[in-house]
Image (spheres, coloured by chain):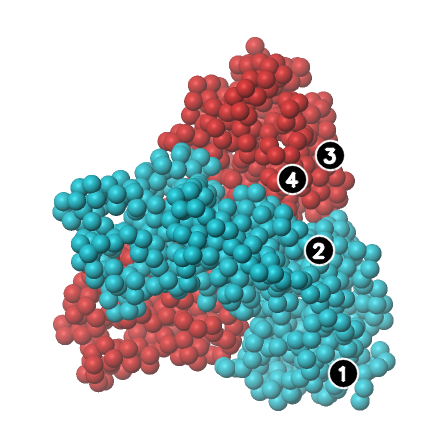
Chain colours: A red, B cyan
């Protein structure tokens, strides 16, 4: 049977409800009632508006459908069944089971899923990123449809998303808010007050369309009207949680609970029984994404000994890597500090100012990664903590994003601890599959920026505020996962291990120790994850196991942690003298603060003397 | 000279500008222009409306003044000079200097500062917490005044704050937005569009008062009108950045830049020269905070062997600890999962539902800590990543807050990776001065909840979703920083170290190993920070250095990292066999997922056999 009339669509909606119940009851967990509330809107969307080539999920002209309320996965997967790409058997027998692709919350293990959701307030910001790509990069007419929950409207990130969607005039973006008035443990803040939602949405510059989310005609009219006028659309659908089954409809206490088998049976009967409609829907309009011309990447070259901040080298290298047409850059209104502005000057059409909204900053990068671009997002390293939930989720999304955090550690000086990233290395190392880089000079920073562009997953670079001498000639190579012995001799008695500013402190300490006849090896640990375990073991072996690790970071989970974990994993536990920031810093000059934190050259010298009993 | 007429107030405003210039020029860094824009509003506030006993900052009846735009610290400190509590000498000679209390961004090292700011979008949410305390706990008429920047209006957390302020009818809260239209690197999104701001503020349920932020009469009228009607007030002050010095006024390129000495001289001349007015302002209305009756805390007692989830024990113990009248609880709309609802049932007047807004959840706790309450905030452990910037800042604020994250690790099962905290231990360990607890059974969880109430700083407890056997009798003690040997004998060949669910896996493994004649010691590492280093060293010594650490967390910076770092710090590096979650989990049963992650009892048994060559 084909789905043509609104009556047919109504049948489809009932099928989606029945299937949502069936799969969650079979799994023994899941969110059927949160699926049932949105079934009518999704049925109309799927049958009449979503332009999607189900056989070719990579078709660049496809619309994008994101469930920001990821817990409504039964509904999403039931739509996949209705599209004919997931069998009834897979839906009922594998949902939420071990090893299955129909996970409790959607992830891109499924080819029709762009991003992982399940942490509320993220699907819409991600969708803003996809819509930005559609309008400004691909220049394709695809639409981005995001199903949101009403509970997640309490997340600030939603308002960052509405704000940016309006600011960038994303009329290719439609958010549909399933206002079923019930959260997990009771009523939402605003209940069914669609007026209140409308005012908020309109105040943030989007077009609001309040509708009865169970009136197929109203839904159809609303979906037909989206787009144009340079404004995103937000459809506010008043719905009933558990709609269609009188025993649970609009009742509290049914969030995240599958129906017991007998109830499920009664529900399916009330909903008119099982159906197995397949809906072909609309095909995408076609077209190919704009091709951005690509040229040779010619990295900046720095003179040995010249003082250049790694944050500046990041910016200059990013501008150079921008010769690749697939590279885009975003910043959180601090581009003159992170030096992302170098890219903005060189490639203004591929630069996106996200203002002070770090969650949306990262989410926009994730959305652009969905469309195959190579996004770099930059802000102060400290402020990436604001987006940690987004960063961890982007790993589940299998996104390929590059983050650059500047102004790390006490080295920033007078601005004080609020601006000092002192936990970012621990945070980023703990992200699944992440890469963590921390160059010490301009040459290695520039080289690694190019490496970042080629590397998948979540790739983080930490840069330093101050300017320090260039240590390497322009033809030196810095593979990810490597390390550099910056100074060594046969008689080395100790290895000093640093990265970023502390490498320079290690070099200064080595100079002073040399004056006392103590020979110190210095290791530049520019890649913290993956880490060059062999270089660590070699250094330990060459210098009697004496290792001094110095970091401008709190002691937990940073460079010291990385060294200890790597040596342990290799079966050669290390003993390190660990110099890290143990107190709460205040303001001061970089030199004063590093001295106070115990990570200055003087402290390193003292630590070595203690170690050698000298 | 006294400050009485508006003309006098105008003089005070000029003094604040001059002093903002003087101190930042002397320091060679800082944000004078961001201070000058808000000087008129702050002068009127300080002279006529702020009710503050400057000699007694701890007076509970004092108003609260928070600079959410913390970079305007020159203005704040100039107000302290005008109040007579900071000398001109201290202001000019110590601002931003090493060891000084006048740091680059305000911190509570200063007795008149409630919370550290400098990461934008946090002062207002913190202020909401203080206002909640004022209205619902202290029941005192003090007001909370928050100076906000216009750039930070792009942060989603601001809208979480406006939303909650309106929801809780906080008419004791006034936000003043300094709309100087210029951010760090250029114009803000909305510029001087006060209409757009007004619509947003009103849509979020607050009263908006747009004014000319340099018209003292308008300012005075606006400040006189705040309060009442159960609504927070937001004064939108149209201002000029750098107001009062024609060479920088309303010009781009002057953010975060002190005036060079000669410019500063010209500016001071244009502003009418130095002044040294002292303003006494208004005294607080007086009154004492409501005294909440306190009773004996009687912790729940659990039967050995009974299966009880630690999250339930957390909730039950929290309800019990609520016998202390100073304990309050907050939750992010998942109280029926975290079991914070047990507290809500027992002490509804001291329970605050923050809905799905984790940043505001933590900030509200910080605000309540400012007023001396003992807040516990709970949500899924995974979702505390959403508030990491707030958590790190609360450490700088020297706040005393307790966080409980439930549903940790792969053990949660079918919901999938979006709901699995797998990086929370690394994140929380890296917070300055934090305490990280991870109980394995109901008895220890309950005990530790009471310990949390007595402990300062940022205290985190990780709880487990599933129910596991009670391991300890009700009279057992669990000091923070301790560990428990759960099983041991003289012939132990290996130590198994776990916490939370993995401790139970270790016990099961020990049982199976015992059947093969292998004797395993089992260590319950319920306190990860501080950690019981001696217990680790003793175990290593007793079992031939053979340690197996098992954690339901990614490998970086979690329990394994804590063990390695502790042993290293003690000068006895450990070699551990480290079982942790190395892949990206999907859905499944807890048993399937722990087996797949390599942290099940079977994997522990295999690891021990490998270690012993058995």
Residue B279 numbered tag: 1
Q: Position of residue B330 (x, y in %)?
A: 60, 53
Looking at the image, how many numbered discs can be counted on the residues? 4
The residue that appears at 48% across and 67% down in the rendered structure is: A420
Residue B20 place in picture, x, y as percent: 66, 79
Which mark is in front, 3 or 2? Answer: 2
- Mark seen at residue B239: none
Instruction: From the top left corner, tell me how far across and down residue B255 is, in percent.
Output: 61, 69
Task: State the residue at coordinates (44%, 19%).
Answer: A89
Within the image, what quadrant is residue A557 found in? bottom left
A181 above or below A601? above
Of discs 4 and 1, which sits in the foreground? 4
Is label 4 on the same chain as label 3?
yes
Q: Which residue is mark 4?
A: A186
Chain of residue at mark 3:
A
- Labels 3 & 2 near each other (Cβ < 8 A): no
Q: Is residue B15 left or right of residue B316?
A: right
Q: Residues within 10 Å of mark 4 (few under 14, many from 20)?
A: some
Task: Inspect this view and state whether residue B543 appears.
Answer: yes
Say which chain tag 1 marks.
Answer: B
Residue in view at x 49 percent, y 35 percent: A105
Compute the Cα span from label 4 to label 3. 23 Å
Q: Which mark is residue B165?
A: 2
Separation of marks 3 and 2 at Cα, in angstroms = 25 Å
Circle number at residue A210: 3
Q: Secondary structure at mark 4?
A: loop
């Amino acid at each position: 049977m084909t789905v043509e009339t609104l009556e047919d669509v109504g049948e489809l909606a009932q099928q989606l409800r029945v299937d949502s119940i069936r799969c969650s009851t079979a799994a023994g967990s899941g969110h059927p009632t949160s699926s049932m509330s949105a079934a009518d809107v999704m049925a109309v969307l799927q049958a009449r508006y979503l332009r999607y080539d189900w056989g070719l999920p990579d078709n660049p002209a496809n619309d994008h459908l994101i469930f920001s309320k990821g817990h409504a996965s039964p509904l999403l997967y039931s739509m996949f069944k209705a599209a004919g790409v997931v069998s009834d058997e897979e839906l009922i027998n594998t949902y939420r089971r071990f090893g299955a692709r129909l996970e409790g919350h959607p992830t891109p293990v499924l080819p029709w899923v762009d991003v992982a959701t399940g942490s509320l307030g993220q699907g819409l910001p991600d969708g803003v990123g996809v819509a930005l790509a559609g309008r400004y990069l691909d220049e394709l007419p695809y639409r981005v449809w995001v199903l949101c929950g009403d509970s997640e409207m309490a997340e600030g990130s939603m308002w960052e998303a509405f704000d940016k969607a309006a600011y960038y005039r994303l009329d290719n973006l439609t958010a549909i808010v399933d206002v079923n008035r019930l959260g997990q443990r009771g009523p939402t803040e605003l209940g069914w007050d669609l007026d209140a939602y409308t005012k908020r949405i309109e105040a943030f510059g989007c077009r609001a369309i309040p509708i009865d989310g169970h009136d197929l005609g109203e839904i159809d009219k609303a979906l037909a009207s989206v787009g144009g006028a340079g404004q995103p659309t937000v459809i506010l659908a008043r719905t009933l949680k558990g709609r269609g089954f009188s025993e649970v409809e609009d009742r509290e206490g049914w969030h995240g609970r599958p129906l017991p088998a007998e109830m499920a049976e009664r529900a399916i009967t009330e909903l008119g029984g099982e159906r197995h409609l397949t809906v072909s829907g609309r095909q995408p309009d076609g077209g190919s994404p704009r091709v951005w011309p690509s040229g040779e990447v010619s990295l900046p070259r720095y003179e040995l000994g010249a003082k250049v901040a790694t944050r500046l080298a990041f910016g200059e290298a990013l501008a150079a890597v921008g010769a690749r047409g697939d590279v885009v850059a975003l910043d959180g209104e601090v581009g003159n500090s992170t030096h992302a502005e170098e890219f903005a000057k060189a490639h203004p059409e591929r630069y996106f100012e996200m203002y002070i909204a770090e969650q949306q900053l990262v989410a926009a990068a994730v959305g652009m990664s969905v469309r195959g671009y190579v996004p770099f997002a930059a802000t102060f390293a400290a402020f990436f903590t604001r987006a940690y939930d987004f960063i961890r989720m982007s790993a589940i999304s299998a996104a390929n994003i590059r983050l650059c955090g500047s102004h790390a550690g006490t080295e920033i000086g007078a601005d004080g601890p609020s601006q000092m990233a002192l936990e970012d290395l621990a945070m980023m190392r703990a992200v699944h599959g992440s890469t963590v880089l921390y160059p010490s000079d301009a040459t290695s920073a520039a080289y690694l920026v190019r490496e970042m562009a080629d590397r998948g997953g979540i790739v983080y670079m930490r840069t330093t505020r101050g300017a320090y001498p260039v240590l390497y000639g322009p033809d030196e190579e810095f593979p990810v996962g490597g390390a550099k012995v910056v100074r060594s001799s046969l008689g080395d008695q100790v290895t000093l291990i640093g990265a970023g500013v502390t490498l320079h402190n290690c070099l200064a300490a080595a100079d002073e120790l040399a004056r006392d006849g103590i020979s110190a090896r210095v290791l530049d640990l520019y890649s913290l994850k993956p880490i060059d375990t062999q270089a660590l073991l070699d250094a330990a072996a060459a210098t009697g196991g004496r290792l001094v690790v110095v970091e401008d970071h709190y002691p937990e989970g940073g460079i010291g942690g990385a060294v200890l974990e790597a040596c342990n994993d290799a079966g050669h536990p290390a003993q390190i003298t660990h110099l890290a920031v143990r107190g709460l810093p205040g303001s001061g000059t970089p030199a004063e603060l590093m001295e106070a934190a115990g990570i200055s050259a003087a402290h390193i010298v003292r630590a070595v003397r203690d170690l050698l009993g000298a």
